[in-house]
Amino acid sequence: MSSAVLYLAIVAVWAVVLVPMWLRRDTDTTGISRLLHKRPDEPAADDDADDQETLHEEETLREEGLPAPRRPVSRAAVIARRRRRTSGLAALLLTSVAISAAGLTPWWVVAPPVLLLAGHLALLRVAVGMDTARRRAAAQARAAARARALQARRAAEAAEPAEVIELVTPDEVFDQYADDRRAVGE
């Protein structure tokens, strides 16, 4: 009986991992190439000209056997991925606790999901710190750029205005190819 529950638990864990992967599967890459290369994002509808150039470049790289360059991942996609992983690990923990409480498995079956969830939460804590530091650095860079722009504007206002010189245009323009004209010294 306990081996059947163990197999069921293994199938449940693999289902938690593989079902989202199958749902997000890309049609043009399969197998090991999916593991080696990140799937390109879907092109946005408002940037048609840039997207056509990017798609052409990616097709050229694929023909040459080179991986397509990675596009930056949006913050919303990162947060969604973190939520999915956290909820999946929480569901795994609740399932293992329920199975253990029902007496189908020993108590130590709960330990791996607890460790996985604790490790994931520790990584999330580090990621939040890194995100905060990145936002703070970006805000400082924006403030420094604003200060430099303000300083440049004040320096431009304080500088003496340039003297405007009016150019006098002659009535007759010299044409070196004219028949009756000669260069100086001839």
Image (cartoon, helix red, strand yellow):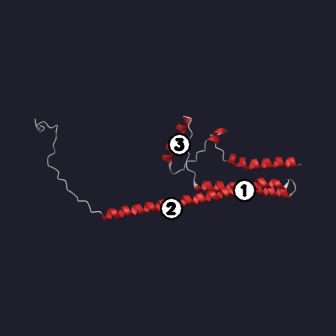
Image position, residue 85 (x, y; %): 69, 54
Q: Quadrant of the C terminus?
A: top left
Is residue 26 placed above or below 81 in the rendered structure?
above
Mark 2 vs 3, N-terminal side: 3
Q: CA distance from mark 1 to mark 2?
A: 32 Å
- Examine the rendering and report whether any part of residue 89 can be seen: yes
Q: Contact (CB < 8 A) between labels 2 and 3?
A: no
The answer to which of 182 and 92 lies nearer the viewer is 92
Mark 1 vs 2, N-terminal side: 1
Q: Contact (CB < 8 A) between labels 1 and 3?
A: no
Mark 1 vs 3, N-terminal side: 3
Task: Give the residue type that dot 3 points to.
Answer: Leu
The answer to which of 139 and 43 lies nearer the viewer is 139
Residue drawn at x 56%, y 59% is: 133
Residue drawn at x 38%, y 63% is: 151
Task: Give the residue type that dot 2 points to.
Answer: Ala
Local SS, label 3? helix
Badge 3 is on which residue? 55
Residue 134, labelled with which disc? none
Residue 117, labelled with which disc? 1
Mark 1: few, some, or many residues within 10 Å (few <14, many ≥20)? some
Residue drawn at x 68%, y 55% is: 84
Badge 2 is on which residue? 139
Residue drawn at x 67%, y 57% is: 122
